[in-house]
Amino acid sequence: MARGITQDRVNQAADALLARGERPTIEKVRAELGTGSPNTLLRLLEV
């Protein structure tokens, strides 16, 4: 897993997107976090 990207951070980013009425896609979560590879985010979003 990439340094700095944790399940908690991905969950928080996804929750923030959902709170704004947005679907938490890989691209949107990555923009929210400002970092992260699409493959890493995909694995963490699927949990």
Image (cartoon, rainbow, N blue to C red):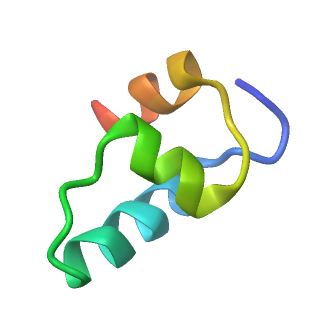
Compared to residue 45, the image places residue 38 above or below, namely above
Location of residue 10 in the rendering, given as x and y in whole percent from the top left corner = 50, 54
For image coordinates 32% across by 70% down, the residue present is 17
For image coordinates 44% across by 35% down, the residue present is 44
Pick the quarter of the image with the N terminus.
top right
In this view, which residue lies farthest toward the bottom? 19
Seen from the viewer's position, the closer of residues 35 and 12 is 35
Q: How many marks?
A: 0
For image coordinates 77% across by 28% down, the residue present is 2
- Give the left or right position of residue 4, taking residue 45 as reference: right
Seen from the viewer's position, the closer of residues 41 and 28 is 28
- Give the left or right position of residue 25, taking residue 38 as reference: left
In this view, which residue lies farthest toward the right? 3
Location of residue 4 in the rendering, given as x and y in whole percent from the top left corner = 81, 47
Location of residue 39 in the rendering, given as x and y in whole percent from the top left corner = 53, 16
In this view, which residue lies farthest toward the top? 39
Q: Write down the quadrant of residue 22 in the picture.
A: bottom left
For image coordinates 37% across by 77% down, the residue present is 16
Q: Write down the quadrant of residue 27 in the picture.
A: top left
Compared to residue 47, the image places residue 11 above or below, namely below
Location of residue 33 in the rendering, given as x and y in whole percent from the top left corner = 63, 58
Pick the quarter of the image with the C terminus.
top left
Compared to residue 14, the image places residue 37 above or below, namely above
